[in-house]
Amino acid sequence: MLEGLLAVALGAVALALALLWRQSRRNERLASRLQAANSQIGELRGRDPLTGVLARPELESALDDAVAASDRGAAPLALLYVALDGFRPVNEGFGLRVGDAVLRETALRLLRQADDRQLVARIGGDEFVLLLAADAGQAQERAQALVQAMRRPFEFEGQSLALTASVGVAVYPAHGSRPRLLAHSALAMRAVKLGGGDGHAAFDPAMAVDAREQIQLLQDLRRAVARRELRLVYQPKIDARTLQVTAAEALLRWQHPQRGVVSPAVFIPLAERHGLIHELGGWVIEGACRQAAAWRQQGLRMRVAVNLSAQQLRHEDLVPQIEAALARHRMRAERLTCEITETVAMEDTAVTRAAFERLRRAGVHVSIDDFGTGHSSLATLRRLPAAELKIDRAFVVDLDSPGQAGTQALTIVQAIVQMAHTLGLRVVAEGVETPTQRDRLVALGVDELQGYLFARPMSARALGLWAEVDGQDGGGSAAHAAFRASLFEPTAPAQLGD
């Protein structure tokens, strides 16, 4: 009996010891994992979790150290502020997973440009900073290398995404004290963005002044519609064979009470950046449709064209806005042309495809503007409900240039015309300023012409008076368009390709 109890006791002790040993081993493993996790956290502290480059606080600290070293005469210092162009449509069209992959690849490309004396940080969104030991000339060279590196397509899951970057350069101490250096490099980047992106620029003190002026200009622009400072002018489009006016493009103008005429190149990008473009675009659509109705009462049956920005195209209310304006003014949809730049049209994202499908169902006349400057895909072009292409004015200008420039422009225009006509699209050439350009475009088979050779943008009243004069004499010179009883010939949107 005693021996049995002793055996049970020894077994219990052995079991307890085994359990204690297992618990000890478990605690050791947990401690090891905790130590590894703490080590990993230590390594990641101060890093952007998505890309692995420095985060903003650590950049500020590194910048403090670099400025102190520069003050001691160690080396010149420069900041390169890098922002992607057109990144938002990637997130919207392809989703955050692809957008995150683009950001990680961007960070890798920046790191490849770095050496031991350089630091890469992500400021937020699609904006990065490269800190380097370089003088002004070296910084500009490195900025150009970054621009070229970012032009390489991003390849993800069978998608080839063409993006570019805007790079701002600020050098210490020439471009500002330590507290202003980062802000000044950002201002230089935004100046590149304003110019269309895909480039680099060094900070200039005028940029800081421009930033303050833009804040005031933005406030004025918000009030411009209510103050009746905006107006539309119209530039006719001319049939290349008959020299009859077939359409007029509506162009927005701003007459500022103190600044005078503000260029669209200034206020349109401002409106796009600050969310005003949909409101302004709606005002243009409404005004153009109203004017088309007024011209119709005069017997001038012209198609009227409006320009759509990328932001408008991505707005769900765009097509209902267009349809409401057409209904109010009893205007057929095919008599409204929506001009969309080639760059926007070729994004081929889910958002742009849906927008084009809505425009197709609405029956409006779609034109691809500035054609020849982007990276068009024939397959994408076939899927768009476009009725016409507008050749970019850069090729038109070079048509009467001597030597290789003129020959290349002629070849490009000829190729565009042949491709467009094969797809059943009309071709418009804008920026026609000389008889030589006109004659060569007509010989190449361009359908419509637009430019100062025929008419500058004019008020609706002036265009109506011009129509009355031409209607009385019934003709026109080779450079002057003629109005006839019927100026409009419907052109149905192209059928979507398979």
Image (spheres, rainbow, N blue to C red):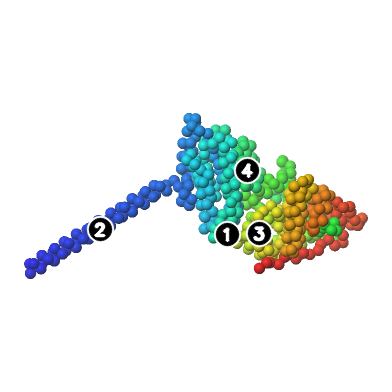
Q: 83 or 148: which is nearer to us?
A: 148
Q: Is residue 249 visible?
A: no
Look at the picture and state if 357 lies above or below 269. Answer: below
Kind of residue at badge 4: Ala
Q: 352 or 390: which is nearer to us?
A: 390
In the picture as drawn, the residue positioned furthest to the top comes out as 72
Q: Residue at x 60, y 54 (%)?
A: 162
SS for tag 4? helix
Quarter occupied by the N terminus:
bottom left
Q: Residue at x 49, y 34 (%)?
A: 67
Q: Position of residue 26 (x, y in %)?
A: 28, 57
From the image, tell me which residue sits under label 4.
191
| Precedes in sequence: disc 1 or disc 2 | 2
Q: Position of residue 458 (x, y in %)?
A: 80, 50
From the image, tell me which residue sits under label 2.
23
Look at the picture and state if 364 lies above or below 259. Answer: below
SS for tag 1? strand
From the image, tell me which residue sits under label 1.
159
